[in-house]
Image (spheres, rainbow, N blue to C red):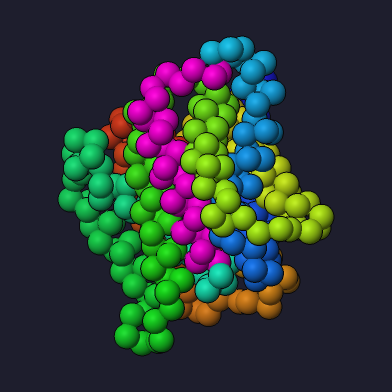
Amino acid sequence: MNPSHNSLKGIGLVLFAMAILPFIDVCAKYLGQQGVPIAQLVWARFLFGSLFTLPFAASHAGRSAFRPVNPFYNACRAVLLILGTFFFFLALKHLSIADTLAIYFVQPILITALSPLLLGEHVGPRRWLSVAVGFIGVLIIIRPGLQAFNVGVAYALLAGFSSALYIIVTRHLTGRADAIVTTFQTSVIGLLPLTVALPFYWQAVSMNQWLLLGLMGAIAITGHFLITKAYDYAEASLLSPFNYTEMIMAVIAGWYFFGDFPDQWTFLGVAILISCAIYISWRERSLGKKDFPVGDPAKSE
């Protein structure tokens, strides 16, 4: 199979993943509107994530799938993934799907800003300029002082911050374990404290709600598999820009299911954020830095 065909296959897998991932948000927003506790949504997300990845992890690594290579980093990943998922789902109660995702796109900007402190990486003036412009894009989206404050904005920013820290921690595990095994281990580690605390937030759910909870887990794991598989065919520097096509389906799904549609300022802010993120990705690639995908762990892990 020639390289160009492989690249097209990788792009196709990413596009398919980005087309289905927003339906996790649809399920979460719908269930949240029905009064299902956010903590219970996060618990179900980890439960079904563990169940769906178990057979793949076990077949790939056998008993070693149950022995984390680095328990500390896996525990940190689990905590950050819980926080990122919790804040993202909480933001969906107050914002549209598209607006929540738009603010969440601050994630790659934050990764670059935090990398000198947490990874010891050097960030040059061009990338610092991109970080500054990216934050201007965030301000255009949220427009502080020009519209009534919505607490969902704070939750979406916290989700992006937690996700950025999650990806930074993940960089320490890159190459130490297979992606599906690490995904399973992180899901199980996160599931344990959520299950212990279950009696404090449990609320009975209907059969239809259970189906939606299961659907969330199935979409998440399918999306993660598609993204992981895509990087078998093409490099992250080629595929990363296509991650932002998720915004297209987020807008369509939010409009179709909830009647929400972002205004022109949100689109402008998103365009600035995406442009900065793509430039940072290209710049890091041109400097020979590790080719590491910036994904969407709150929904794809």
Residue at the (68%, 78%) spot, across then down: 259
Residue 87 is covered by the magenta coloring: yes
* Quarter of the image with the N terminus in it: top right
Extreme residue in the right direction: 207
Q: Which residues are magenta?
A: 65-92
Is 129 displayed left or right of 38 in the figure?
left
Residue 72 lies, with reference to residue 145, above or below; the image says: above
In the rendered image, residue 207, in percent from the top left (x then y), is placed at: 81, 55
Residue at the (65%, 26%) spot, across then down: 54
Which quadrant of the figure has residue 139? bottom left
In the rendered image, residue 57, in percent from the top left (x then y), is placed at: 62, 22
The answer to whether residue 231 shows anywhere in this view is: no
In the rendered image, residue 249, in percent from the top left (x then y), is placed at: 65, 60
Residue 53 is covered by the magenta coloring: no
The answer to whether residue 34 shows anywhere in this view is: yes
Is 21 displayed left or right of 244 in the figure?
right
Circle count: 0
Residue at the (22%, 53%) spot, across then down: 128
Is 285 displayed left or right of 241 in the figure?
left
Residue 26 lies, with reference to residue 283, above or below; the image says: below
Q: Nearer the viewer, residue 5 or 293?
A: 293
* Quarter of the image with the C terminus in it: top right
> Is most of the magenta stretch helix, strand or loop?
helix
